[in-house]
Image (tube, rainbow, N blue to C red):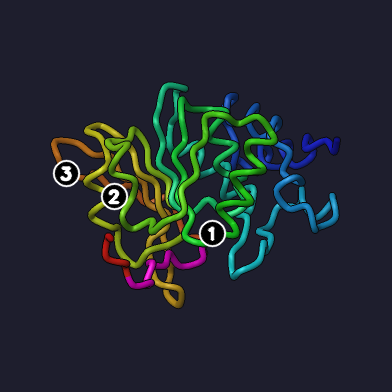
């Protein structure tokens, strides 16, 4: 199996990776398995990689920053919006109690779910659906992470965030500057912290007509 140590060492030297638990998670999860069609050296390069359907697996630097921003202790129930390849969900699964991940594209969600199961990540549940609606059946969540950028923070996700919990998301339009923001819910209000400029694919809604129940 390829050794991700060079990438991890680089992230630490750049100041993008600090937490020992996150370092261990990124060492444990085989990034190349989530991008099987690219060369091994490309899989462990520090840049995003296209995974088809207009989606990407995020740059390792961004994965590290977003994961550390969640401040995980190991007991959290996390909602992830945008399963993609499943790589970020696997990282989170090493660090939390359970990950509930939503993917709007069936082909990506189903592939990621099968991949995660094969790798033994039994504490990840993948659902095909609209991320804007969240996963109310399992709310409230201790953490919410968005891996695609809405123009504004969806209120339904705020409503599914537990008191004292953290939400990390890129916010902004595809042609405007996006900011990575961390929100903490306190007294029903959101405390906001700007973590810097980022560039993510847009978070899209499920525009398919809903079928009436039989």
Q: What element carries label 3?
A: strand
Q: Is residue 178 above or below residue 81?
A: below
Q: Is residue 110 above or below residue 164?
A: below
Which label belongs to residue 106? 1
Q: Does label 3 or label 2 sit earlier along the sequence?
A: 2
Q: Where is residue 58 in the image (x, y as percent from the top left)?
A: 60, 54
- The boundaries of the magenta stretch are 200-209
- CB contact under 8 Å: marks 1 and 2: no
Q: Is mark 1 on a helix, strand or loop?
A: helix
> Which residue is at the front of the view, 137 or 40?
137
Horizontal side of residue 210 vs 201, given as left or right: left
Residue visible at 66% across and 59% down in the picture: 48
Q: Does label 1 or label 2 sit earlier along the sequence?
A: 1
Q: Does label 1 or label 3 sit earlier along the sequence?
A: 1
Which label belongs to residue 161? none
Image quadrant where residue 3 sits:
top right
Horizontal side of residue 31 vs 210, given as left or right: right
Q: Is mark 2 on a helix, strand or loop?
A: helix
Q: Name the residue under label 2.
A: 157
Q: Which residue lies furthest to the bottom in this view?
A: 175
Q: Where is residue 157 in the image (x, y as percent from the top left)?
A: 29, 50
> Which residue is at the front of the view, 8 or 138?
138
Q: How far separated are the C-alphas under marks 1 and 3?
A: 34 Å
Q: Name the residue under label 3.
A: 189
Residue visible at 26% across and 43% down in the picture: 160
Q: Which residue lies furthest to the left in this view?
A: 187
- CB contact under 8 Å: marks 3 and 2: no
């Amino acid at each position: 199996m390829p050794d991700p140590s060079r990438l991890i060492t680089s992230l630490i030297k750049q100041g993008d990776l600090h937490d020992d638990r996150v370092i261990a998670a990124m060492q444990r999860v085989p990034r190349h398995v989530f991008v099987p069609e690219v060369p091994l050296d490309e899989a462990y390069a520090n840049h995003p990689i296209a995974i088809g359907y207009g989606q990407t697996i995020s740059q390792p630097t961004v994965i590290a920053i977003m994961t550390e921003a969640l401040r995980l202790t190991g007991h959290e129930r996390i909602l992830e919006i945008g399963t993609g390849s499943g790589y970020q969900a696997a990282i989170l699964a090493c660090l939390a109690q359970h990950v509930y991940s939503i993917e709007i594209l069936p082909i990506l969600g189903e592939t990621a779910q099968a991949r995660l199961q094969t790798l033994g990540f039994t504490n990840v549940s993948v659902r095909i659906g609209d991320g804007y609606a969240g996963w109310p059946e399992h709310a409230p969540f201790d953490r919410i992470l968005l891996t695609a950028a809405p123009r504004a923070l969806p209120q339904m996700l705020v409503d599914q965030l537990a008191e004292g919990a953290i939400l990390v998301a890129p916010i902004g339009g595809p042609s405007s500057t996006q900011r990575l923001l961390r929100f903490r819910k306190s007294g029903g209000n959101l405390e906001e912290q700007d973590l810097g400029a980022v560039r993510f694919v847009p978070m899209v809604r499920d525009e398919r007509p809903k079928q009436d129940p039989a």
